Amino acid sequence: MNKESRFPAPKKRKAAALDGIDYKITQNMTVADRSGNNEIERLEALLEQVTDPEIPVVSIRDLGILRDISLHAGQVTVTITPTYSGCPAMSTIRADIRQTLSAAGYDDVRLKQSLSPAWTTDWMTDEGREKLRAFGIAPPQKSAQGLCAVVSPGTDVKCPQCGSEQTECISEFGSTACKALYRCLHCAEPFDYFKCI
């Protein structure tokens, strides 16, 4: 299967195995050439059903957690990147991937977790951002390029309820560590803002 490089060559590091998962620290990400590969397209459609357990309206593809799918000699390899290294949702996501693929007849599944490059909100799809807004969570407003994960003063965050930009940060931590708690000064509704990482 042809692969094209999306990131610089990997640095040499040791890989560790834990819980039957290959944890690889790599900077090399590849995307399989999916032209005409119905099996990969079927796998992509199946994995589109796997959602983030903390935000069940967005799939792992929408969030950019799903990084690669490959199929070789009957073995499906799924590469995922956590939103942050301690994300408690990842064990549930791994189990959901296995269960979804097993129910579709794929029993030989290998999960790889890639920690580098680190996940960024830039990997979210536009569709995923819209799903967040419709669910009542303000999506990241700016590119993560060069910005830190903490909400910085002056960050313009539109209220997902009424669309007003008259909002204020109440707490830098919301319902999960990757979100901040905001309040709209126009409609007075509190809401989560998915931090730009």
Image: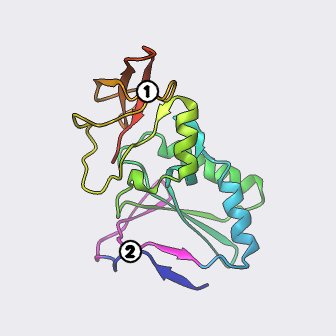
Task: Tell me the SS state at disc 2.
Answer: loop
- Where is residue 82 drawn, in percent x and y? 43, 51
Can residue 94 be seen here? no
Q: Residue at x 36, y 44 (%)?
A: 86
Give the answer, above or below, for where 82 lies relative to 133. Answer: below
Q: Residue at x 78, y 60 (%)?
A: 105
Q: Give the spatial CA distance, label 1 vs label 2.
A: 38 Å
**Amino acid under label 2?**
Phe
Give the answer, above or below, for where 91 lies relative to 176. Answer: below
24 vs 135, left or right, is: left
Residue carrying label 1: 164
Q: Give the mark count.
A: 2
- Where is residue 132 drawn, in percent x and y? 53, 38
Magenta stretch: includes residue 100: no
Q: Residue at x 46, y 16 (%)?
A: 187
What mark, if any, has residue 3 been given in the picture? none
Q: Residue at x 28, y 76 (%)?
A: 11
Q: Quadrant of residue 151?
A: top left
Q: Earlier in the sequence, mark 1 or mark 2?
A: 2
- Where is residue 92 drawn, in percent x and y? 54, 42
What mark, if any, has residue 7 been given in the picture? 2
Q: Dot 1, crowdedness within 10 Å: few (<14), some or many (≥20)?
A: some
Q: Magenta residues, as a range?
A: 11-32
- Where is residue 44 drawn, in percent x and y? 67, 61
**Amino acid under label 1?**
Ser
Give the answer, above or below, for where 73 lies relative to 87. Answer: below
